[in-house]
Amino acid sequence: MRKLLPVLARLGVSLWAGAVAAVAFVVAPRVFGFLADPPRAGELMGPIFRRIDLFGVGAAVLFAVAARGSRWRFALACLLGAAAAVNAFILGPGIRGGKSELHGLSEAVWGAILLGTLVLALAGPRTPSQSQP
């Protein structure tokens, strides 16, 4: 299990980064461009954003557990997980509740999540010296 955990952690944040990028750069622009009614497009995209954020919370926890030996990796994973939770439980519901001013903040959080997940995916949860038995 000790050897499998880092692989699963890296896979999780890589999938998270890919999902954020795909939805942010491909899916959402197409949906919002196709539908002339932005609130309706938001209704369609809201559950997708929430699912990705919830997946991200889980991926961040897994990565943090695998990265316990590296303070910066652990801290970044915890920060990204918290950001995803804020998006899922505070910003997303606020936007759906009519607080459209939160939309820009939510986009900025997703941008930060994308950058952070790419850093974690490239770095991996452990340095090579930590991976030795």
Image (tube, rainbow, N blue to C red):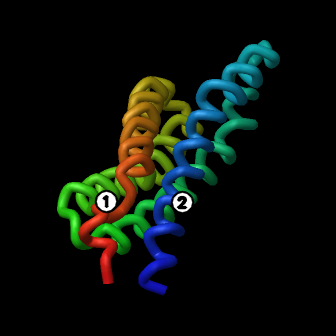
Q: Residue at x 53, y 44 (%)?
A: 17
In the image, residue 69 lies at what x, y percent?
Answer: 22, 71
Could you tell me if the residues under marks 2 and 1 are in contact, i.e. CB atoms within 8 Å?
no
Disc number placed over residue 89 in the picture, else none: none
Q: Residue at x 46, y 79 (%)?
A: 3
- Per the image, the residue denoted by label 1 is 78
- Per the image, the residue denoted by label 2 is 12
Q: Left or right: 48 with respect to 96?
A: right
N-terminal label among 2 and 1:
2
Q: Nearer the viewer, residue 95 or 14?
A: 14
In the image, residue 18 lies at what x, y percent?
Answer: 59, 42
Q: Nearer the viewer, residue 50 or 90?
A: 50
Task: Give residue 85's quadrant in the image.
Answer: bottom left
Q: Left or right: 62 with respect to 37?
A: left
Instruction: For mark 1, give the secondary structure.
Output: helix
Q: Quadrant of the C terminus?
A: bottom left
In the image, residue 64 lies at what x, y percent?
Answer: 34, 67
Q: Residues within 10 Å of mark 1 (few under 14, many from 20)?
A: some
Q: Residue at x 62, y 43 (%)?
A: 19
Q: Amino acid at mark 1?
A: Cys
Q: Amino acid at mark 2?
A: Gly
Q: Whole-Å distance between the Cαs marked 2 and 1?
A: 14 Å
* Number of numbered markers: 2
Q: Residue at x 75, y 21 (%)?
A: 30
Judged by depth in the image, the label closer to the viewer, 2 or 1, is 2
Q: Residues within 10 Å of mark 2 (few under 14, many from 20)?
A: many
Q: Is residue 104 placed above or below 51 in the rendered structure?
A: above
Task: Give residue 31's quadrant in the image.
Answer: top right
